[in-house]
Image (cartoon, rainbow, N blue to C red):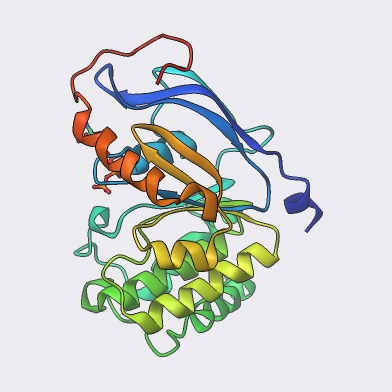
């Protein structure tokens, strides 16, 4: 547990992230404290998924820097949007969840009796006992998301990133998965989640980053989501030029 409590903050210093030299997020400066639960909120196209890709390291900044402290590769667990998963991939629930152990045993390592017990526990923890040998292509959206959360739990990472984890998921599953998020917080893990449902954000995430290509507000959720801030965010993405060059002005608005 000390490993998690002592995890470093993640710091953004005037970060620009984008594609083909065009910014999708810019002028992001701030810090994610270890053990915090941060919601990332904003309109469509605001750059929320782009930010998570930058955080996990699959997208390099076009400008500025992201300091992950001493976090090693693999210590940031990442659940992309459900649409990015190929559900036709021939793998069953047990084997999908077992891939959460890769960081510890390597892709070609045997899972072993101990590992198999951990996989079964993780599957039970998300209420999927009995589904172990079901191909993932036969699961409902909610069941698949439960399996993906079980895999995340097994990864045992100090930082967990979730991209729209509750989109098109039934209310019981959302409640169960939020319980798991609360448990991760109790274990001092850092959780960053892209969310659209502001009720869920207000209920379960004490900190919020409201993003609209640039940060509109970042701080305690009630403050960050004040109506005038939300209005400002809506106007920002509508006005943004998708082919704009990188702007190097210091923290320009
Ligand atoms: N691979 C890519 N190549 C080029 N442009 C991209 C790519 N991915 C995203 N973009 C663009 O970057 C901008 C931000 O996209 P992003 O997916 O980060 O937004 P988002 O806030 O997650 O949106 P949503 O809520 O709709 O999922 C959008 O204009 C999008 O078209």
**Residue at image x 32%, y 14%?**
246
**Residue placed most toward the observer, 197 or 176:** 197
Q: Measuring from the top left, give residue 155's x and y in whole percent.
A: 56, 58
Residue extending furthest toward the top: 249
**Residue at image x 19%, y 25%?**
242
Q: Is residue 207 left or right of residue 88?
A: right
Q: How many marks?
A: 0
Query: Would residue 77 be seen by someone viewing this image from the given angle?
Result: yes
Please identify the quadrant where the C terminus is shown. Answer: top left
Please identify the quadrant where the N terminus is shown. Answer: bottom right
**Residue at image x 72%, y 44%?**
7
Q: Measuring from the top left, give residue 87's x and y in whole percent.
A: 22, 64
Residue extending furthest toward the front: 228
**Where is 10 relative to 80, above or below?**
above
**Where is 181 relative to 12, above or below?**
below
Q: Measuring from the top left, give residue 10's x and y in whole percent.
A: 61, 36
Residue extending furthest toward the right: 2
**Where is 113 relative to 104, above or below?**
below
**Residue placed most toward the observer, 151 or 79:** 79
Query: Would residue 111 be seen by someone viewing this image from the given angle?
Result: no
Q: Measuring from the top left, give residue 82's x and y in whole percent.
A: 29, 60
Q: Quadrant of ligand 1?
A: top left
């Amino acid at each position: 547990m000390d490993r998690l409590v002592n995890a470093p903050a993640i710091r953004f210093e005037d970060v620009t992230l984008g594609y083909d030299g065009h910014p999708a997020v810019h002028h992001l400066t701030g810090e994610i404290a270890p053990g915090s639960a941060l919601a990332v909120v904003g309109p469509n196209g605001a750059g929320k998924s782009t930010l998570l890709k930058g955080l996990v390291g699959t997208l390099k900044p076009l400008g500025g820097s992201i300091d992950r402290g001493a976090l090693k590769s693999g210590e940031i667990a990442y659940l992309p949007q459900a649409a990015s998963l190929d559900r036709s991939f021939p793998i069953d629930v047990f084997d999908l969840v077992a891939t959460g152990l890769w960081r510890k045993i390597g892709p070609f390592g045997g899972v072993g009796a101990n590992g198999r017990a951990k996989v079964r526990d993780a599957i039970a923890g998300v209420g999927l006992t009995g589904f172990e040998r079901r191909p993932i292509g036969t699961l409902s959206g909610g069941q698949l998301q439960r399996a993906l959360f079980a895999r995340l739990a097994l990864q045992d990472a100090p930082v967990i990133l979730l991209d729209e984890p509750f989109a098109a998921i039934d209310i019981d599953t959302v409640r169960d998965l939020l319980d798991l998020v609360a448990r991760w917080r109790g274990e001092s893990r850092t959780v960053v989640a892209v969310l659209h449902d502001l009720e869920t954000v207000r209920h379960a995430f004490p900190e919020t980053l409201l993003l609209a290509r640039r940060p509109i507000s970042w701080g305690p959720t009630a403050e960050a989501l004040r109506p005038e801030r939300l209005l400002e965010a809506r106007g920002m993405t509508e006005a943004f030029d998708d082919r704009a060059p990188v702007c190097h002005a210091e923290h320009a608005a």
